[in-house]
Image (cartoon, rainbow, N blue to C red):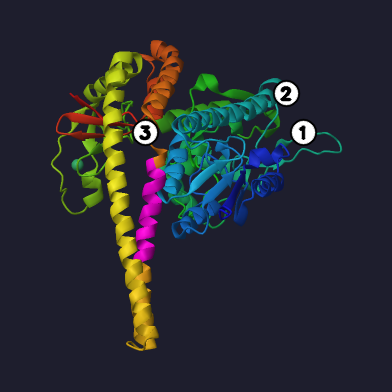
C-alpha cells in the first residue's frame, strides 16, 4: 500500500472578508474534511487570520515556506488560488518556491492543477484574484463615496489636528462628525498668525513650535515641516473638508522597521483637485477665508520649486535583468527614460563592478512588445517555437533520465557499502563506535542522493507534452487577441500582458532574452 500523503493546511482571510462574515475556521474545516476524504494526513496548519492576499510577507505563510525546506509534508492544501496570493507575481514566487522544494500544491476547489494547462489555469486564476482584489477595493471605495457625496458625512475617524471626531451613535442614529478641540485649535490659529502676521516660513513655524514646547497630538512625536505645511494648507479650518483628496501609495521610504505589515500602502499622494469631494463643516470654521488665502500665497512664494520630475512608464520594470544579475532600473537621464543596471546601488559605497551601458527604455520596450505580440499573434512562429520546445524537452528528458539513472546507481553502490559495514561490525571486524560513525556517513550520502532523485523525478513528469502546451498557448492567444488590439497605446494593458507571459528577461549588450512563463523556450531579440 502507498504511504498516505502528508499535507499541511494553509488558510487565510483578509480583514475585509472577516467583515463579510467569512471566517478562517470554516475554511480550515473545509480543508480538514477534504483531507480526510482524500486519505491525507494533516501534519500542520498554517493560518493567516486577517492578512491581505496582496502581501507577500505574512507570518504563517513565511513559517510554512521555512518549514518546507525540511520536507515535513508532501503537499500544501489550500482552498483556492486566491488564498495563496492576490497578486500574480507573488503567486508565482510562492508556487515556484514550494515546487522547487518538491512540495505539491493542492487546490481544494481546483483539482488537476499540476499539468501544463492546469498551471496555466492557476496563472489565470491568479490574475482573476488580482482583478477581484481591485473590484473589492473599488466596492469599498464606492460605498464610502456614496456616504460622502450623497449624505455629506464625515468618514474616517482620524480628524485633522484641531478637531475631534465624535463617533456615530448607534442609539440616536446621529452620524459621526468633527468637533473643535479647543486646545489644539488655538495652536492652529497661532500657526496661521505666525505666517500671516509675523511672516514666518514653515520651517520657522516648526522652530517656534518646538521652542515653545507645543505638544503634537501624539506627544512623543516632533513637529516636522510636512506636518506644519499640511495644517497650513487644510481648508478644513475654513469650514470645508475634502474627502478623496489623497490616494494611498506604496511608501517610497518606509519608516517602520516592523517585519510584518498588514498595510502595504504606507505612503500617500495628492489626487487631482477635480476628484476631491467637498463636505461643508461650518461648525468647525476657525480660520477666516481671507487669512487662509493670504497664508496660501505666502507659502507659495516661499516654496522652492523642485525640478519637475517627469514621470516615465517602464514596460519591463522588475522584469529585465543584467548579465551581472542585477535588475535594470527605470531611470530618466536628461529627462529621457533609460534602463540602467542596478549594480551600483548594490555595491555602493564601493564602486560599481558592472560595465553594462544604459539603454533607452523605449527601444527595449518597443522591441519586447513587438516580440511578445508577434509570438502571440503568429501561429507559425509559435509552431516553430514549439518544435524547438519539443526538441528541448526530449533532450532534457534524456539528460534527466541519465542523471536519474546515475544517481540510482550511486545509491545502490552506497547501500551495498552500508551492508558491508554492517557485516564487518557483526563479525567483530570493527567496533560499535566505528560502525556507527561510518554507517551514519553512508546513510547521509544516501539521503542526499534520494533527495536529488525526488527533485528530478517530479520535474520530469511535470514537463508537459508539446501538444498540450500548444493548446494552452493558442487558448491564451485567443483570449489575448482582444486585449492586444486595444493595448498598443495603453501601457498598463501592455504591462499586464507582458507580466502575465514573461517570467523575466535578460539583456546582454543589446541582445534581450525573454523567458516565458509558459514553457515556450527562450526567445532572443536584438535592439
Ligand atoms: Zn549589470
Residue that numbered label 2 is attached to: 151
Percent of width and height locating residue 347: 22, 51
Q: Which image quarter holds the N terminus?
A: bottom right
Q: Which mark is residue 175?
A: 1
| 30 w.r.t. 430: above or below | above
In this rendered view, identify the residue nearer to me: 410 or 509.
410
The quarter of the picture where residue 106 lies is top right
| 10 Å crowding of disc 2: few (<14), some (14-19), many (20+) | few
- Tag 2's secondary structure? helix
The answer to whether one can see residue 253 in this image is: no
Q: Is residue 459 magenta?
A: yes
For the residues bearing labels 3 and 2, Cβ distance under 8 angstroms: no
Is most of the magenta stretch helix, strand or loop? Answer: helix
Q: Residue at the location (43% across, 17% down)?
A: 480
The quarter of the picture where residue 433 lies is bottom left
For the residues bearing labels 2 and 1, Cβ distance under 8 angstroms: yes
What are the residue bounds of the magenta stretch? 445-460
| 463 w.r.t. 495: above or below | below
In this rendered view, identify the residue nearer to me: 111 or 393.
393
Percent of width and height locating residue 354: 15, 44
Q: Residue at the location (37% across, 69% down)?
A: 444
Closest to the camera, between mark 1 and mark 3, is: 1
Q: Which image quarter holds the C terminus?
A: top left
Residue 158 relative to residue 70: left or right: right
- Tag 1's secondary structure? loop
Q: Which mark is residue 303?
A: 3
| 10 Å crowding of disc 1: few (<14), some (14-19), many (20+) | few
Q: What is the C-alpha distance between the residues marked 2 and 1?
A: 10 Å
Residue 11 relative to residue 519: left or right: right
Amino acid at each position: 500500500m502507498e504511504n498516505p500523503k502528508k499535507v499541511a493546511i494553509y488558510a487565510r482571510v483578509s480583514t475585509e472578508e472577516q467583515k463579510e462574515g467569512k471566517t478562517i475556521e470554516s475554511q480550515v474545516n473545509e480543508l480538514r474534511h477534504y483531507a480526510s476524504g482524500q486519505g491525507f494526513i494533516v501534519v500542520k496548519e498554517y493560518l493567516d487570520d486577517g492578512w491581505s492576499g496582496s502581501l507577500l510577507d505574512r507570518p504563517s505563510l513565511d513559517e510554512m515556506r521555512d518549514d518546507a525546506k525540511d520536507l515535513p509534508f508532501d503537499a500544501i492544501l489550500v482552498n483556492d488560488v486566491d488564498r495563496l496570493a492576490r497578486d500574480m507575481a507573488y503567486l508565482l514566487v510562492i508556487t515556484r518556491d514550494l515546487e522547487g522544494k518538491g512540495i505539491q500544491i493542492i487546490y481544494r476547489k481546483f483539482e488537476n492543477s499540476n499539468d501544463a494547462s492546469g498551471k496555466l489555469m492557476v496563472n489565470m486564476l491568479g490574475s482573476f484574484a488580482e482583478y477581484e482584489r481591485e473590484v473589492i477595493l473599488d466596492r469599498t471605495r464606492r460605498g464610502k463615496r456614496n456616504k460622502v457625496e450623497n449624505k455629506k458625512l464625515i468618514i474616517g475617524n482620524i480628524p485633522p489636528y484641531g478637531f475631534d471626531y465624535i463617533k456615530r451613535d448607534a442609539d440616536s442614529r446621529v452620524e459621526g462628525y468633527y468637533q473643535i478641540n479647543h486646545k489644539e485649535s488655538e495652536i492652529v490659529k497661532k500657526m496661521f498668525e505666525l505666517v500671516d502676521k509675523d511672516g514666518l516660513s514653515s520651517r520657522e513655524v516648526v522652530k517656534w513650535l518646538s521652542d515653545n514646547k507645543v505638544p503634537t497630538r501624539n506627544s512623543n512625536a516632533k513637529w516636522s515641516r510636512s506636518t506644519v505645511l499640511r495644517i497650513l494648507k487644510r481648508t478644513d479650518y475654513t469650514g470645508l473638508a475634502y474627502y478623496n483628496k489623497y490616494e494611498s501609495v506604496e511608501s517610497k521610504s518606509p519608516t517602520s522597521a516592523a517585519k510584518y505589515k498588514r498595510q502595504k500602502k504606507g505612503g500617500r499622494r495628492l489626487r487631482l483637485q477635480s476628484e476631491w469631494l467637498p463636505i461643508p463643516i461650518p461648525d468647525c470654521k476657525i480660520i477666516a477665508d481671507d487669512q487662509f488665502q493670504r497664508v496660501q500665497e505666502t507659502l507659495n512664494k516661499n516654496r522652492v520649486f523642485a525640478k519637475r520630475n517627469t514621470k516615465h512608464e517602464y514596460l519591463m520594470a522588475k522584469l529585465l535583468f543584467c548579465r551581472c544579475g542585477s535588475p535594470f532600473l527605470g531611470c530618466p537621464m536628461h529627462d529621457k527614460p533609460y534602463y540602467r543596471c542596478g549594480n551600483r546601488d548594490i555595491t555602493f559605497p564601493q564602486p560599481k563592478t558592472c560595465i553594462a551601458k544604459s539603454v533607452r527604455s523605449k527601444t527595449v520596450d518597443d522591441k519586447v512588445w513587438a516580440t511578445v505580440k508577434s509570438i502571440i499573434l503568429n501561429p507559425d512562429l509559435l509552431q516553430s517555437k514549439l518544435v524547438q520546445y519539443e526538441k528541448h524537452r526530449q533532450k532534457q528528458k534524456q539528460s534527466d533520465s541519465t542523471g536519474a539513472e546515475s544517481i540510482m546507481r550511486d545509491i545502490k553502490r552506497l547501500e551495498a557499502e552500508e551492508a558491508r559495514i554492517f557485516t564487518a561490525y557483526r563479525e567483530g571486524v570493527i567496533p560499535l563506535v566505528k560502525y556507527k560513525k561510518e554507517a551514519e556517513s553512508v546513510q547521509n550520502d544516501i539521503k542526499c542522493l534520494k533527495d536529488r532523485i525526488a527533485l528530478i523525478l517530479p520535474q520530469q513528469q511535470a514537463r508537459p507534452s508539446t501538444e498540450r502546451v500548444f493548446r494552452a498557448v493558442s487558448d491564451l492567444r485567443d483570449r489575448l487577441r482582444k486585449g492586444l488590439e486595444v493595448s498598443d497605446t495603453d501601457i498598463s494593458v501592455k504591462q499586464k500582458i507582458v507580466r502575465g507571459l514573461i517570467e523575466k528577461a535578460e539583456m546582454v549588450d543589446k541582445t534581450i532574452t525573454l523567458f516565458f512563463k509558459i514553457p515556450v523556450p527562450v526567445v532572443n531579440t536584438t535592439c
